[in-house]
Structure formats: structure tokens, C-alpha cells
Image: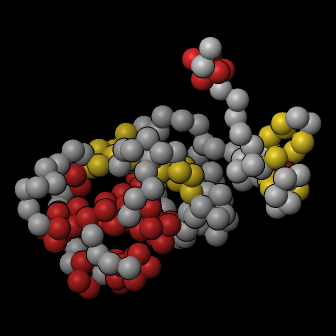
């Protein structure tokens, strides 16, 4: 595939803001996952396709653009482990796949060459296709809002903490850490 004539790659670059190796990783990972699960270019309109990304780097933008999995819809889940790994699930068919970027020497060549390698190189040279390691996540929930009794802002109810009988958002809640109080004695 010649990336210079690939409309989807151009759209990913436009969405992300620039071409880079990280975007190329996500671009190819999304393409591999869709091929492995037998999905032919249909973006996820709701939550039928899910991606768990183990990083919050550039590749996530390409995956969002190609698959339609987005943080806002709840079908792009960021599980930050620091790995260039992505697990994809198709709720319609039950198929899933984990696509991991293989280790590579980031200093071996320039960004353009690395980008080209991820997009045009043999899949098996840059990616490992594995079984998924977690179950398909539940669909996104809609939570009630609770008003923080300190700052007055609305907060998703599952993110509220109680302190001294008051409902507080995470910003207003100060966690008690017994380890530190013991050290002061």
C-alpha cells in the first residue's frame, strides 16, 4: 500500500495534526484488528466495536478515526499500562483480537522511515497478534450527577467520595493516608 495515496491515512493525519510513527502504529493496528475480526471498513456507530488501548499516545487517534471507537462514546477504554497494545472486541460477533507493537530500535532510522515501516512493512515484522487477555467490557453506563458540597460542581455519582458526611468530588476530597500520620509520631 502506498501511504501517499491512502485517503484513510490522510484523514488520520489531518485528525491527529501530523504524521508520526505513533500514529502509524495505531493506523496499522486498527487495520490489522478489523481484518482479523472480518470487519470491512464500517466505523462503530455506537458500541458494537470496542477498543481497550494500553496507552494514551498518538496511535489512539488513528484507532478512533478508523474504527469509530471513541472515549466519549465509551467504546475506547484507556487502560494505561504504558504498552503499545490494543485489544479489540466486536460485540456483534463475539470476535476479539489483541494487537501489540513488537519492540524496535527507535534510534535506528528517522521518523519517516519508522512510519513507513509500520504502515508498509510486513505485518509480522512490527506487530504480534494475540488472544485478548480480558473479557469484553460492559457497555457504557449513564450515571446520575451529584452536586459536590464543597465546590458546587456536578459530578458523576460513581466518582463522589464521602468525607465528614459531605459528598465531595475527587478534587475536593483529600484522602486520609494512615502511613503518613504514623510517621509524624
Quarter-of-image position of residue 160: top right
Quarter-of-image position of residue 136: top right
Q: The C terminus lies in which quarter of the figure?
A: top right
Residue 122: x percent and y percent? 18, 57
Residue at point 49%, 62% (across, down) = 39
Residue at point 48%, 45% (across, down) = 80
Residue 60: x percent and y percent? 44, 61
Number of labels in the image equals: 0
- From the viewer's side, name the closer residue of 95 and 173: 173
Judged from this view, the residue extending furthest toward the front is: 185
Residue 21: x percent and y percent? 25, 64
Residue at point 50%, 67% (across, down) = 64
Q: Can residue 118 be seen by looking at this rendering?
A: yes
Q: The N terminus lies in which quarter of the figure?
A: bottom left
- From the viewer's side, name the closer residue of 137 and 148: 148
Question: Seen in the image, is 117 located left or right of residue 19?
Answer: left
Q: Can residue 31 be seen by looking at this rendering?
A: no
Residue 83: x percent and y percent? 37, 44
Residue at point 92%, 36% (across, down) = 165
- From the viewer's side, name the closer residue of 171 and 122: 171
Judged from this view, the residue extending furthest toward the left is: 108
> How was the colour assigned to the protein in this rendering?
secondary structure
Image height of 163 relative to 65, above or below: above
Question: Seen in the image, is 181 located left or right of residue 111?
Answer: right
Amino acid at each position: 500500500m502506498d501511504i501517499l495515496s491512502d485517503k484513510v491515512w490522510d484523514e488520520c493525519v489531518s485528525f491527529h495534526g501530523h504524521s508520526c510513527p505513533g500514529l502509524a502504529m495505531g493506523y496499522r493496528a486498527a487495520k490489522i484488528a478489523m481484518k482479523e475480526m472480518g470487519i470491512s471498513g464500517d466505523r462503530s456507530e455506537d458500541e458494537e466495536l470496542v477498543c481497550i488501548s494500553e496507552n494514551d499516545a498518538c496511535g489512539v487517534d488513528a484507532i478512533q478515526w478508523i474504527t469509530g471507537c471513541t472515549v466519549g462514546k465509551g467504546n475506547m477504554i484507556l487502560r494505561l499500562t504504558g504498552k503499545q497494545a490494543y485489544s479489540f472486541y466486536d460485540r456483534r460477533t463475539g470476535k476479539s483480537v489483541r494487537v501489540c507493537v513488537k519492540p524496535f530500535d527507535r534510534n535506528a532510522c528517522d521518523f519517516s522511515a519508522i512510519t513507513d515501516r509500520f504502515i508498509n512493512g510486513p505485518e509480522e515484522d512490527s506487530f504480534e497478534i494475540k488472544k485478548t487477555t480480558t473479557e469484553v467490557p460492559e457497555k457504557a453506563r449513564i450515571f446520575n450527577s451529584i452536586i459536590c458540597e464543597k465546590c458546587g460542581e456536578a459530578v458523576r455519582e460513581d466518582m463522589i467520595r464521602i468525607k465528614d458526611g459531605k459528598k465531595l468530588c475527587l478534587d475536593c476530597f483529600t484522602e486520609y493516608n494512615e502511613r503518613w500520620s504514623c510517621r509524624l509520631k
